[in-house]
Image (cartoon, rainbow, N blue to C red):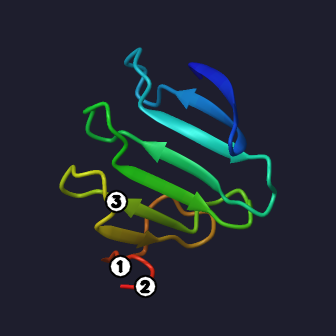
Amino acid sequence: KMGTRRETNPPETITKLDLNCSGRIDAQFVEPDDASKPYLLAIDSKGTGHFDIVMIDNGRKGWFDIALYDTVGDGKAHLVGYFKKDEDKPYKFAPYKESGS
């Protein structure tokens, strides 16, 4: 854990993490105050300083339902991974399509 900060708009707690013990923040866990909003874990998996994976725990169950992957480094999701309960790797992937497209 590298620190925690509070945001007010929207109200949430953000915990900064160093997942690979490099001394640099490479992930952040977002916990919205609104219990109807999902937990998010944003990860910089390539060490670029930009988050390229966003894992989503809908319903705040303690396990991730889906993850969105930026596969080309443009800051947009291109791939979605689907998780089974208590598994840390997706069981399937599909192209990501924005709502309404």
Report how far apart the C-alphas of labels 1 and 2 lie in the structure. 8 Å
Q: Name the residue at 29% across, 56% down.
A: 70
In this picture, is 3 found above or below 38? above
**Which residue matches tag 2?**
100
Amino acid marked by disc 2: Gly
Q: What amino acid type should be assigned to the residue bearing mark 3?
A: Tyr
Query: Helix, strand or loop at disc 2?
Result: loop
The percent position of residue 92, horizontal first and vertical second, equals 38, 77
Q: Nearer the viewer, mark 1 or mark 3?
A: 1
> Would you place residue 96 above or below residue 52 in this image?
below
Residue 97, labelled with which disc? 1
Q: Earlier in the sequence, mark 1 or mark 3?
A: 3
- Is residue 15 left or right of 70 when viewed as pictured? right
Extreme residue in the left direction: 72
Image quarter hosting the N terminus: top right
Placement of 49 over or under 76, stated as above or below:
above
Residue 8: x %, y % from top left = 72, 36
